[in-house]
Image (cartoon, rainbow, N blue to C red):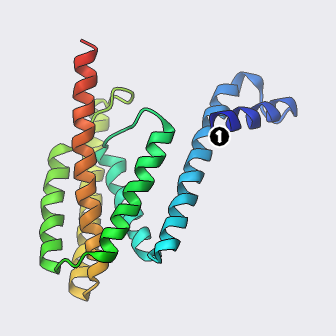
């Protein structure tokens, strides 16, 4: 992705579309954009192959809301991130498809996961330190996200949408897992730098 973003940026500079002094900004922007597009395309293909488009949408809505404000594990390379995220997504979809879990157990998993997420958040990262003000904003937005996901879960519980409820439960549990891994990685990074 880095090479492709360099080619596109250099092409735009040669054709006077962007200025050379903004090379690194555009190159980084294109790289991130290409990486997100590839991840999205692979995720869509996985969801379609599993015939679980609705569950995939719920997964990504819940995951994005939680991940944006709670943090979690950040891997060191794009390729490792792509492989881990797509593998995790596939595993969660397969668990949803083949597991049979009662609504009560799903509700319990969601409740425990929410308590853990609230207790662990926000997960720090050495490459993206948070200030005190930003940390408070993230906590507030995480609270709203948990409330919205909780209300959606209650709606699924009452309506009998057990697969969607299981999707929320497994996604929330997955978030707890990557938050714990993120905290461990952060602690190891801090100890290495001392």
Q: Quadrant of residue 147?
A: bottom left
- Rendered residue at 21%/42% (across/down): 180
Give the percent coordinates (x, y) of residue 11. 82, 34
Q: Is residue 47 left or right of residue 92?
A: right
Secondary structure state at the residue bearing disc 1: helix
Q: Which residue is mark 1?
A: 30
Give the percent coordinates (x, y) of residue 181. 25, 40
Q: Is residue 187 left or right of residue 4?
A: left
Q: What is the residue that sits farthest to the right in this orientation?
A: 15
Q: Nearer the viewer, residue 110 or 83?
A: 83
- Rendered residue at 63%/34% (across/down): 2
Q: Nearer the viewer, residue 125 or 81?
A: 81
Give the percent coordinates (x, y) of residue 150. 23, 68
Q: What is the residue that sits farthest to the bottom in this orientation?
A: 159
Query: In this rendering, does residue 158 appear at all?
Result: yes
- Rendered residue at 63%/39% (across/down): 1
| Rendered position, 15 above or below 60 | above
Give the percent coordinates (x, y) of residue 62. 34, 62
Q: How dense is the environment of label 1, judged by Cα within 10 Å: few (below 14), some, or many (20 and up)?
A: some
Q: Tally the marks.
A: 1
């Amino acid at each position: 992705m880095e090479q492709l973003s360099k080619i596109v940026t250099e092409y735009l500079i040669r054709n006077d579309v962007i200025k050379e002094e903004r090379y690194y900004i555009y190159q980084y922007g294109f790289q991130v954009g290409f990486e997100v597009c590839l991840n999205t395309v692979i995720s869509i293909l996985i969801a379609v192959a599993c015939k679980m488009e609705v569950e995939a949408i719920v997964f990504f809505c819940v995951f994005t809301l939680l991940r944006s404000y709670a943090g979690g594990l950040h891997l060191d390379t794009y390729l490792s991130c792509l492989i881990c995220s797509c593998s995790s997504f596939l595993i969660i979809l397969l668990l949803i498809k083949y597991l049979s879990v009662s609504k009560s157990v799903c509700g319990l998993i969601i409740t425990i996961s929410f308590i853990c997420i609230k207790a662990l958040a926000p997960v720090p990262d050495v490459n993206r330190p948070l200030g005190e003000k930003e940390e408070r904003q993230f906590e507030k937005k995480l609270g709203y996200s948990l409330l919205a996901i909780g209300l959606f879960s209650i709606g699924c519980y009452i309506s009998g949408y057990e697969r969607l409820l299981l999707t929320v439960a497994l996604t929330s549990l997955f978030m707890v897992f990557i938050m714990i891994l993120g905290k461990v990685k952060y602690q190891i990074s801090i100890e290495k730098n001392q």
